[in-house]
Image (spheres, grey):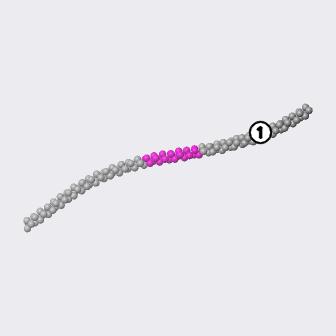
């Protein structure tokens, strides 16, 4: 009976050793997995840190771009107001020039009208002088006779 019991205990011991070796193997694998996971976690933390740095840089760049955009908009608005004022000045000058142009045109029209009237009167006077000259010749020829 003792020998049988010894064989059973030996078998149990072998099974326990096998389980212990299996547990050691699993424990070693677990340690490797933990090391790999720890390394990946460290990489992820580094990546998060780099990403956060990039996010901060982008936020600063965004703020700078927003300031530049607002300044540009303000400059464009000021330029627009300036251009509108210049346009109004030019419109006023154009109206003044149009008014002067109309005055000059009226003067030219009046001058042309007066020239035609003077020419008509000159023609009438020439005709009258011709008649008077003819009458004078008649009178002179009657006087000579």
Q: Label 1 belongs to which residue?
A: 119
| Residue 144 in sight in this render | yes
Which quadrant of the view contains residue 18? bottom left
Say whether residue 70 is magenta.
yes
Magenta part, dominant SS: helix
Residue 58 x, y percent position in the rendering:
41, 48
Q: Is residue 134 left or right of residue 16?
A: right
User: Residue lying furthest front in this view?
Assistant: 145
Q: Residue at x 67, y 43 (%)?
A: 98
| Residue 114 in sight in this render | no
Q: Nearer the viewer, residue 104 or 62?
A: 104
How crowded pointer 1 is (Cα within 10 Å; few <14, some 14-19, many 20+) is rated as: few
Q: Nearer the viewer, residue 7 or 80?
A: 80
Q: Which residues are magenta?
A: 60-85
State which quarter of the image contains the N terminus. bottom left
Which quadrant of the view contains residue 104? top right
Residue 83 x, y percent position in the rendering:
58, 44
Q: Is residue 13 above or below residue 109?
A: below
State which quarter of the image contains the C terminus. top right
Which quadrant of the view contains residue 27? bottom left
Q: Residue at x 47, y 48 (%)?
A: 66
């Amino acid at each position: 009976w003792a020998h049988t019991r010894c064989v059973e205990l030996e078998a149990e011991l072998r099974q326990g050793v096998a389980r212990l070796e299996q547990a050691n193997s699993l424990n070693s694998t677990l340690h490797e997995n933990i090391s790999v996971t720890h390394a990946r976690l460290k990489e992820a933390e580094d990546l998060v840190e780099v990403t956060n740095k990039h996010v901060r840089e982008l936020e600063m760049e965004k703020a700078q771009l927003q300031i530049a955009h607002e300044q540009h908009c303000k400059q464009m608005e000021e330029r627009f107001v300036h251009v509108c004022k210049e346009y109004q000045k030019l419109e006023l000058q154009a109206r003044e020039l149009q008014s002067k142009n109309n005055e000059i045109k009226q003067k030219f029209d009046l001058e042309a009208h007066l020239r035609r009237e003077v020419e008509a009167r000159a023609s009438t006077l020439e005709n009258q002088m011709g008649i008077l000259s003819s009458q004078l010749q008649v009178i002179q020829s009657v006087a000579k006779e």
